[in-house]
Image (cartoon, rainbow, N blue to C red):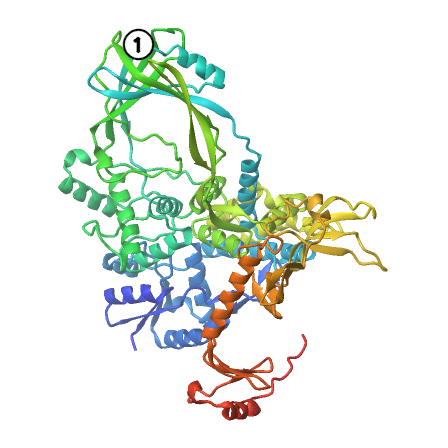
Amino acid sequence: MASNLVIVESPAKAKTIQKYLGNDFSVMSSYGHIRDLCDKGMAIDIENNFTPEYCVSKDKTTLVKELKKAAKGAEKVWLASDEDREGEAIAWHLYESLGLTDDKTERIVFNEITKTAILRAVENPRKINKELVDAQQARRVLDRLVGYELSPVLWKSIQRGLSAGRVQSVAVRLIVEKEREIEAHVPVASYKVSGIFTDGKISFKAELAKNLPTEEEAQAFLSKCVGAQYKVESVDKRPGKRSPAAPFTTSTLQQEASRKLGYSVSQTMTLAQRLYEAGHITYMRTDSFNLSNDALAGIAAHVQAQYGDNYHQARKFNTKSKGAQEAHEAIRPTNFSKNIAGADDRQKRLYDLIYKRTIASQMAEAQLENTTIKLSNTNAPDAQNFTARGQVITFDGFIRVYQEGTDDENAEQLDGQLPAVVEGDLLRSDEITATERFTKHVPRYTEASLVKKLEELGIGRPSTYAPTISTIQKRKYVVKESLEGESRSFKIFSATADGVAQKEGKENYGADKNKLFPTDIGRVVTDFLLEHYGLIMDYQFTAKAEQNFDTVAAGQKGWQESISDFYSEFHPLIENAPAGARAASRLLGEEPGTGEPVYVKLARYGFVFQFGDGDEETKPRFKKLPQGVGFYDATLEMALRKEVLPRTVGSYQDMEVKANVGRYGPYVMWNKKFFSLTEDTPEEVSIEKAIEIIEAKQKEAANNIIAEFTDEPVIQILKGRYGPYIKSGGKNFKIPKDTEPETLDRAACEELIAAGPTKRRAKRK
């Protein structure tokens, strides 16, 4: 056995590192965390200074035994988990669980998995950084406290199975508030005036700097443009420049991969992890813009060789992120002579993005010439001037390699060249148009722009962004969806030599692609928490907790003191919660005649209307919401609408077809059989559509019949999801694997039915 045991987090990482170390080293993987807070109870002794109780994960018990055995037989154990707080905690849990001692344990870290970095780490070992471990412990304990104490309140007040979290609940709040801002937006129309102007050689576009607010003003302005000439009032030429973006951090990589490649946050992190473990890029969880001296030298050599000395410009970037932790490097390639890397096309595309962004960050600025031309109307010299702007690249610099994407759909791009006109020149325009335009609502969050917002607020850290966004979608508080949008008309007025004419245009508005929308349950939970537990939803309070973790990591504060500070403010909220506080219930009004209150509320299987409060003698009555109607859309009128279900749709083959809503959703019933409705509502489905659904289902069922014996009792041999089976008397019976179902006759089927096991009744929980 090798005298040195190296323990890393992932098998892929172990495989890469093993190549760089000699036969004297054996590399094993811990497959991430081997130990966490125990599942049973809170696992935190609050009275004993928040002492946590850790347990080895059930699926890691065998692995821990193997690692213990390997560690016992090694002269030295090298803990080589990642260099952030999470990695430091993994190393500490390994140290504790494997019963290691200081004299035979070393901690090594590296920012990239290359031979040079690995050997350098082995030559410069250190001990486990307890401050970083404590910062991770503080986060884990605090999140367990919040979840353990707040989630049961949601179960009691709203619905079982819900959860709340220090970061996840704030993230959902951001999305809910954004959606409500969008819903409150009222589009305002104005008129954008533009024209194509020419000096006889080059045509260019110019616009009024401000839209005209009304149709009357637009028509009045255009009437003055009929037969007009346009005088060049001024020509302003100024040099400009553009600087490259900084190399990638975790959040900027997630944002750019979303904009340019369409990757989700979790997909980006998975691909980056693969590239890191294969030794192609540096560690992918970082909020630092730093580049090592070796990296800077490698980039300089590459840029000078590929593009020339004038394209290289060394620069450093300052981190803007609140509370940026650990002085890591930015995400960069490990080898700048390798411009293609990755095991598949998705990895290669992400690597290409990282490669070009890193190279461009150390390249010269792009030099531009910005030109602004202002034109006045000779028929109305006092009217607003037309303005044309152009940009010409005089030296491309970093743009030759890379340009940063933007979330702004209306962001200016590099324009073309404008004609060489001078002040006083007269130009003409064959047509001036005033186009009706409507104000747009603020954009919804994408996964990446939500990460950007959380980072701006100082909430979360590189290792928490992806899990947070995955959690709020998994909990059904938020969904990622696309909207097709709707069509609307807009007016276009145009001024030509013949006068002012009007026509109508069509546009699609409200379309959105892969944006985050709050669900009704997400809104309900957010409203409830804001009303009763506002502190935990406060952005500054949540950011303050992150800052406390940073002070713990810096050794300036004990982790238990940090938890105590937070808990002393949080726990009273739980203790002093108003008795009987309920959420997910809205009073719509009173039922005419009875005077009973009518609510819309969340029940066990979804939102319902409730009539009356109920008492010891009478129970409240319930009614399902119409299909497609949400908690916040429901009205008293909908609740009072007369029941039409079950509804007789018509007849088919002399048997009645009915439509209704059941436990598993809307359906039509015919010949005592049920057929699910996926598109139509039971109130509106036609007999033609119902027959189409019935016949399609019958055809599908007929294709599943291998054989059928029609004498009573009817016996069928059917194709099933898990293989062929026998059906008789509403019960199913297995066919032995070594039996061909086509060879079975009625007698053989009856034998298998008789021999079939009697199903035991499950014990009631």
Residue 146: give x, y in percent of width and height: 60, 54
Quadrant of image for the N terminus: bottom left
Residue found at x 60% / y 87%: 758
* Quarter occupied by residue 320: top left
Question: In this view of the protein, which residue sits in the foreground, 315 or 626?
Answer: 626
User: Pointer 1: residues within 10 angstroms few (<14), some, or many (20+)?
Assistant: some
Quadrant of image for the C terminus: bottom right
In this figure, which residue is indicated by the disc labeled 1?
229
Question: In this view of the protein, which residue sits in the foreground, 600 or 555?
Answer: 600
- Res 99 seen here: yes
Residue found at x 43% / y 19%: 210
Residue 689's place in the image compared with 19, above or below, is above
Question: In this view of the protein, which residue sits in the foreground, 434 or 728?
Answer: 728
Residue 551's place in the image compared with 414, above or below, is below
- Res 665 seen here: no
> Farthest residue in the front direction?
654
Residue 47: give x, y in percent of width and height: 66, 59
Left or right of 657 on screen, residue 590:
right
* Quarter occupied by residue 222: top left
Residue type (three-letter) at the residue carrying disc 1: Gln
Residue 672's place in the image compared with 347, above or below, is below
Left or right of 292 on screen, residue 553:
right
Residue 330: give x, y in percent of width and height: 33, 46
